[in-house]
Amino acid sequence: MDVMIDNCVVDRFASAGLNPVVALRGTEFVLRYTPDLEREYRQKLHHPSASPEARALAEAILESGTLIGFFGFEEPYLGFDQGVFAEEDQAQVIGSIKTKQNRKGPIPRNRTDSGLVAFAKDLLVLTDNTTDSHWKRAPLGKGRVIWWEEFRQTLQREGDIAKALRTFVRS
């Protein structure tokens, strides 16, 4: 099963001394990232307040993960032979999440989230964003949104990142 790690969760993994890239190697889990996540990870590599551990983890995800995006011809979409077609419910979710200009960077606010929420239909998406209600709009499917706190508690119980993720696949 594919897993996406929201940029904010990279910091959580790093501060906890956990490396999902290493922990998931050789398991059924594949790390993926969208074009917007790729951009956010690259920004983290040069951000002065990012810890060295978070930078290293972002770089490791970029090196070992796989780019995935919805089909389209402008940012943040991917073209022929790269993009996957959004199903109707995924397109509705993307359209329902309002974006606005972001003074802190080039990616409009909530645009990264809209793609992650839509992909949560088929993938496991880890986030630490519990304040925005759009995270609860993920279309029903085999995937889901997992909040950091619920993941952290499951990880404590299971003792291993892959085992913790498996509990979310079954639930």
Image: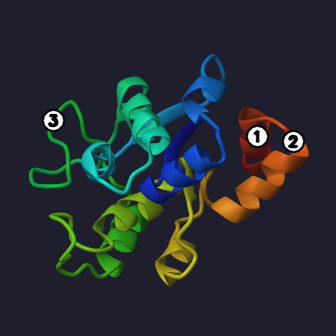
Residue on which the image places disc 1: 166
Q: Is residue 94 above or below residue 12?
A: below
Label 2 or label 3, whichever lies nearer to me, is 2
Numbered tag placed on residue 80 in the rendering: 3
Residue at image location 59% in from the left, 63% down from the top: 140
Label 3 or label 1, whichever lies nearer to me, is 1
Sort mark 3 into few (<14), some (14-19) or many (20+) by Cα contacts within 10 Å.
few
Residue kind at label 3, given as amino acid type? Phe
Q: Element type at marker 2?
A: helix
Q: Element type at marker 3?
A: loop
Q: Position of residue 69 (x, y in %)?
A: 30, 46
Q: Quadrant of the C terminus?
A: bottom right
Image check: 162 left or right of 117?
right
Label 1 or label 2, whichever lies nearer to me, is 2
Residue kind at label 2, given as amino acid type? Glu
Residue on which the image places disc 2: 158
Q: In 3D space, how far apart are the residues under numbered discs 3 and 1 (Cα atoms)?
A: 32 Å
Residue at image location 20% in from the left, 54% down from the top: 76
**Camera-nearest residue between 3 and 43:** 43
